[in-house]
C-alpha cells in the first residue's frame, strides 16, 4: 500500500490519472523507454505492474518500443501505450506510427515534453513535438502542464485527464467515423518530475476495468473487412450491407488482414478466392493456387467482371493490375487500414452481403480446375518402403541412398517456406517480414488456417523483430499455448537487430526468428533496377552485401542459435518444444 504521507508531485499525480484512465478501460500493456522527462509516467507504470494490473515491457530503443506495441495491438486488437522521453526519442516512434496508420492498428503514443516556455528557446532535449505525427494520428493533444496534486482523486485535473484517456482510447480503437490507428498525447512536465504515487492509483485503475472484448468467430449474413487484426474476424454487423448478387463473374481478393470474413464471403457466394499469404484468409475449399498466372490468363483473369476486396493487397503486380482495370467493377470492404482505390472508381462499402440467386457454378468450376492444376506439392518424397524392406541388396541400397539424398538436400526458399507453414497451427502465430521470401511463400503455399501477421501497411522492413516480439508476448498471456514464428530476410533482420535485446526479469516470448540469409537484398534482383544497373552499382547500393556473423549476434543478445542447412534439420528445430527465444539461420543461395 502506498503511504498517503507522501512527497507529492503534480507530474506523478497527472501521470497516475492518465494511465489509470487507460487501464480502467482495458489497456493491458505499457511499453516504456527510459528517460528523465518521462519518469513520472514510467514509475506509475511500474507501480501498475506491481499491482498486477498491466504487463510492462521496457525497451531502451524507442523505435523497438513502438513496434513492440504495434505487434501487441495487432494481436489483441487493443492498443498498447508507449511511453518515452522528449526530443529525438519521440521521432523514433514515427515509423511505428506510420505503419499503424496505414494498417489500421490501434496504438497510444505518450510522449513526455518540456513545458511550453522551454520550447524554441534552446532548452536541452527540446523540439516541437506537438504535430509531429499529425498526418497519421486519429487524435492528438498537447496536454496542459500539471499544476496540482490530488490526494483523493476528486480534483479537476484528475477528471480532465480521465476524460482525455477515454477520448484517446476511443480514437485509437476507431470509434466513430475513422478506422483504428495511432493516437498521440504530448505530456509536458515541470520539475519536480516525479514523486510518490498517489494512494488511489491501483484502486482507480482497477475500478471499472474491463478486458479487451473478444470478437465473435461466428459466421453471419453480413461481413466486414479487417478481421486479420485481433482475435477474430467474422461477425454479424448491424449497419446495412452492400448486396453482391451472384450474377457477374466475380472473384474475392483478400489482401493483408483480410481475415476470415473474406473466406466466408467467398464460400457463401460461390466465388473464387485469391488470398495473399499475409491475409489470414488462405484456407477453405475455394482458394486459388497459382493465382498470379491465372489472373494473367485471358480465359480466367481476362473474363473477370467484378472484384470484392478485403484487406490491402500488396504482394503481386497481377492483383494490382486487376484492381486498376477500368472494365472491372471493384468493391472494397472497409477494413482497419487505408481504403483501396487503385482505379479511381472503386466503391468503398462498410459490409457486404450475398444476394439471392444461384451461384455461377461454371465460373467457379473453371477456377477450381485451373487451381488444382497449379497447386504445388512441396513435401519431400516419401521413403520407398518396399525398397527399404527388400531383401535384394541393390534395391535396398538404392532406397537407402535415395533417402540419404533427401536428408542431405540443401534448403532452398521453397522448402524453407513450406517447413514454416507445415510447422504452424491455429494456436501458433506466423509473422512474415517484408523480404523476398514472403513473395515465395505467397506464390507456392497452399491453404491452411493459421494466424498470420505482417507489417504490410507500408511494407517496410522497420521493426519486424519487435513486431513479432509484441505478437508473441500478447499471444501467450495467461499461459496460452503456441509459438510465434517470424520469417524474414537477412537485411530485415539486421535492420531491427536492436529488438533482440530484452531485459532480464521479463517474461520470455516463445519466439522463433527464422532468417533466410542470402547475403544481401536479393529482392532487387527481380525488379526493374536489375535490368538497368551495372553489376558494381547493383551490388553496392541495391544488393548491399553483408557478412554479419549471426551466431555471435545471437549469443551476445542471449538467444539460442541454430544453423540449418537441410530440411530434416530445420523440421527438427521448428517442431521441438521451445520455451524461449531461438534464432534460426538458413543459408540460401542468391
Image: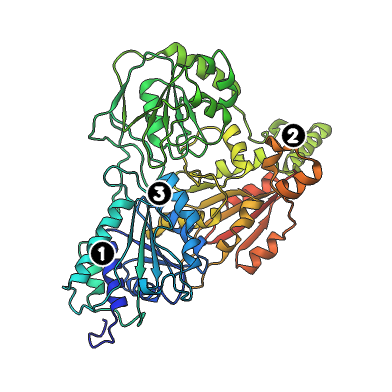
Residue at horizontal 26 percent and vertical 35 percent from the top: 237
The disc, 1 or 3, on the residue closer to the chain's N-terminal end is: 1
Farthest residue, direction right: 394
Quarter of the figure with the C terminus: top right
Residue under circle 1?
21
Residues at marks 2 and 1 touching, judged by CB atoms closer than 8 Å: no
Q: Is residue 408 visible?
A: yes
Residue at horizontal 33 percent and vertical 17 percent from the top: 245
Q: In the rendered view, would you say 128 is above or below 424?
A: below
Q: Nearer the viewer, mark 3 or mark 2?
A: 2
Q: Residues within 10 Å of mark 3 (few under 14, many from 20)?
A: many
Task: Indicate left or right for 317 with 28 as reference.
Answer: right
Residue under circle 3?
105
Q: CA distance from mark 1 to mark 3?
A: 21 Å
Q: CA distance from mark 2 to mark 1?
A: 56 Å
Write down the quadrant of residue 270 in the picture.
Answer: top left
Q: Position of residue 87 (x, y in %)?
A: 47, 68
Residue 531: assigned label: 2
Q: Secondary structure at mark 1?
A: helix
Farthest residue, direction left: 154
Q: Secondary structure at mark 3?
A: loop
Q: In the rendered view, would you say 128 is above or below 482?
A: below
Amino acid at each position: 500500500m502506498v503511504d498517503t504521507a507522501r512527497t507529492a508531485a503534480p507530474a506523478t499525480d497527472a501521470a497516475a490519472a492518465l494511465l489509470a484512465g487507460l487501464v480502467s478501460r482495458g489497456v493491458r500493456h505499457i511499453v516504456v523507454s527510459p528517460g528523465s522527462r518521462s519518469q513520472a509516467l514510467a514509475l506509475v507504470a511500474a507501480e501498475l505492474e506491481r499491482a498486477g494490473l498491466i504487463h510492462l515491457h521496457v525497451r531502451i530503443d524507442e523505435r523497438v518500443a513502438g513496434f513492440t506495441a504495434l505487434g501487441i495491438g495487432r494481436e489483441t486488437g487493443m492498443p498498447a501505450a508507449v511511453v518515452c522521453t522528449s526530443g529525438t526519442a519521440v521521432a523514433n516512434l514515427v515509423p511505428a506510427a506510420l505503419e499503424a496508420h496505414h494498417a489500421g492498428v490501434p496504438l497510444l503514443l505518450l510522449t513526455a515534453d518540456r513545458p511550453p516556455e522551454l520550447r524554441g528557446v534552446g532548452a536541452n532535449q527540446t523540439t516541437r513535438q506537438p504535430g509531429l505525427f499529425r498526418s497519421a494520428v486519429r487524435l492528438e493533444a498537447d496536454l496542459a502542464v500539471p499544476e496540482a496534486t490530488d490526494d483523493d482523486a476528486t480534483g479537476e485535473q484528475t477528471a480532465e485527464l480521465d476524460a482525455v484517456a477515454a477520448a484517446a482510447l476511443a480514437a485509437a480503437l476507431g470509434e466513430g467515423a475513422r478506422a483504428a490507428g495511432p493516437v498521440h498525447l504530448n505530456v509536458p512536465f515541470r520539475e519536480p518530475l516525479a514523486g510518490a504515487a498517489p494512494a488511489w492509483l491501483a484502486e482507480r485503475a482497477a475500478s471499472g476495468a474491463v478486458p479487451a472484448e473478444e470478437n465473435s468467430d461466428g459466421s453471419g449474413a453480413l461481413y466486414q473487412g479487417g478481421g486479420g487484426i485481433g482475435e477474430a474476424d467474422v461477425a454479424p454487423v448491424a449497419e446495412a450491407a452492400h448486396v453482391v448478387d451472384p450474377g457477374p463473374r466475380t472473384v474475392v481478393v483478400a489482401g493483408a488482414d483480410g481475415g476470415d470474413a473474406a473466406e466466408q464471403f467467398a464460400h457463401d457466394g460461390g466465388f473464387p478466392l485469391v488470398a495473399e499469404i499475409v491475409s489470414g484468409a488462405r484456407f477453405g475449399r475455394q482458394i486459388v493456387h497459382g493465382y498470379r498466372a491465372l489472373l494473367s490468363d485471358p480465359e480466367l483473369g481476362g473474363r473477370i467482371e467484378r472484384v470484392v476486396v478485403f484487406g490491402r493487397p500488396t504482394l503481386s503486380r497481377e492483383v494490382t493490375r486487376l484492381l486498376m482495370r477500368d472494365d472491372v467493377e471493384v468493391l472494397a470492404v472497409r477494413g482497419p487500414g487505408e481504403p483501396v482505390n487503385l482505379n479511381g472508381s472503386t466503391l468503398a462499402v462498410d459490409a457486404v452481403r450475398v444476394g439471392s440467386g444461384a451461384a455461377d457454378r461454371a465460373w467457379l468450376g473453371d477456377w477450381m480446375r485451373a487451381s488444382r492444376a497449379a497447386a504445388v506439392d512441396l513435401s519431400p518424397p516419401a521413403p520407398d518402403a518396399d525398397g527399404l524392406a527388400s531383401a535384394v541388396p541393390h534395391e535396398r541400397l538404392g532406397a537407402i541412398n535415395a533417402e540419404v539424398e533427401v536428408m542431405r538436400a540443401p534448403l532452398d526458399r521453397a522448402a524453407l517456406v513450406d517447413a514454416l507453414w507445415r510447422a504452424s497451427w491455429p494456436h501458433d502465430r506466423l509473422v512474415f517480414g517484408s523480404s523476398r521470401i514472403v513473395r515465395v511463400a505467397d506464390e507456392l503455399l497452399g491453404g491452411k488456417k493459421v494466424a498470420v501477421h505482417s507489417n504490410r501497411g507500408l511494407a517496410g522492413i522497420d521493426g519486424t523483430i519487435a513486431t513479432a516480439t509484441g505478437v508473441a508476448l500478447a499471444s501467450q498471456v495467461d499461459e496460452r499455448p503456441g509459438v510465434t514464428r517470424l520469417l524474414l530476410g537477412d537485411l530485415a533482420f539486421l535492420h531491427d537487430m536492436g529488438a533482440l535485446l530484452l531485459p532480464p526479469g521479463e517474461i520470455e516470448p516463445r519466439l522463433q526468428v527464422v532468417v533466410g540469409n542470402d547475403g544481401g537484398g536479393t529482392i532487387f534482383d527481380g525488379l526493374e533496377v536489375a535490368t538497368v544497373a551495372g553489376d558494381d552499382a547493383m551490388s553496392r547500393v541495391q544488393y548491399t552485401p553483408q557478412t554479419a556473423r549471426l551466431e555471435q549476434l545471437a549469443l551476445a543478445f542471449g538467444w539460442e542459435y541454430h544453423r540449418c542447412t537441410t530440411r530434416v534439420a530445420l523440421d527438427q528445430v521448428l517442431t521441438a518444444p521451445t520455451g524461449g527465444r531461438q534464432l534460426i539461420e538458413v543459408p540460401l543461395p542468391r
